Image (tube, helix red, strand yellow):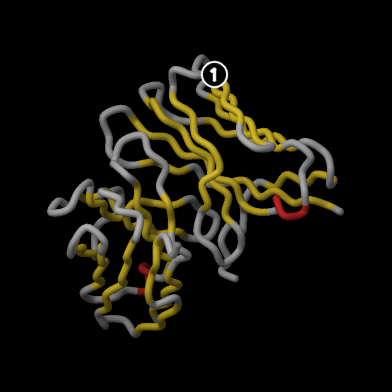
Amino acid sequence: NAGVTQTPKFQVLKTGQSMTLQCAQDMNHNSMYWYRQDPGMGLRLIYYSASEGTTDKGEVPNGYNVSRLNKREFSLRLESAAPSQTSVYFCASSESSANQPQHFGDGTRLSIL
Amino acid sequence: GESVGLHLPTLSVQEGDNSIINCAYSNSASDYFIWYKQESGKGPQFIIDIRSNMDKRQGQRVTVLLNKTVKHLSLQIAATQPGDSAVYFCAENLAGRRALTFGSGTRLQVQP
């Protein structure tokens, strides 16, 4: 089982460029999430989708947009990348959004110059 | 691998010893707690969870203890192995919210 698959694994952008990070899960989960992880810190929630057709802001949504394309896929878009968005981005999914373990992909390592 | 956890607290144990990783959570209204393990270059891996109506839950070689009085969560790993070396995160779910809040993590180093 693939679980949660993120693409690309690595990316380097220049300031001002745009990019979409892709995430797909094959566990038939209803809820999906995007986090960022910076050195010495835990994961911080950017956006989440409790169910297909809904999206909500998390702790650090500024500079990002998301699309829940279908039940399997949840993408994260940087419209105009900034150096402060250099981070490791993780996608996760869970059966529901309440009191369920989230299952994570292996991340996208994004550097913005 | 990426430089996750540059300034994390570190617990160093000998192979075969038991490890205890502690976490203080922030909100007395949190009703669900979870522990993750993260190895270098990988995403967080679910270890064990516990709901607020429980004090203790056991898995394979792991036990989670919840003390709601002092808002403290711990993860005990029995007979620690080199493969247990990783960063461990606790996370809490505030009742009524739809997402987890993560702690900053503890690095476990297992000495052979």
Horizontal side of residue A95 vs B24, given as left or right: left
- Position of residue B86 relative to residue B59, above or below, is below
Q: What residue do we see at 77% from left, 49% from top?
A: B81
> What is the number of callouts on the image?
1
Q: Is residue A111 left or right of residue B24?
A: left
At a point 79% along the width and 39% down the height, the residue shown is B79
Q: Residue furthest top?
A: B69
Q: Residue under mark 1: which chain is it in? A: B
Q: Quadrant of residue A3?
A: bottom left
The residue shown at (74%, 37%) is: B19
Indicate left or right for B107 with A30 as reference: right
In depth, the one of A100 and A66 nearer the eye is A100
Report crowding for label 1: few under 14, some 14 to 19, many 20 or more residues within 10 A (C-alpha). few
Reply above or below: A28 against B78: below
Give the structural element (helix, strand or loop) at label 1.
Answer: loop
Where's residue B22, x and y in %? 62, 33
**Residue that protrudes farthest toward the left in the picture:** A53
Residue B98, image x and y in percent?
28, 39
Q: Which residue is mark 1?
A: B55
Identify the residue at horizontal 29%, vertical 41% (top origin). A97
Where is residue A104 shown, x and y percent of the image? 43, 56
Residue type at mark 1? Asp
- Which corner quadrant holds the C terminus of chain B? bottom right
Instruction: Please state the horizontal and vertical placement of residue B80, each as a whole percent of the image.
Output: 77, 43
In the foreground, A51 or A63: A51
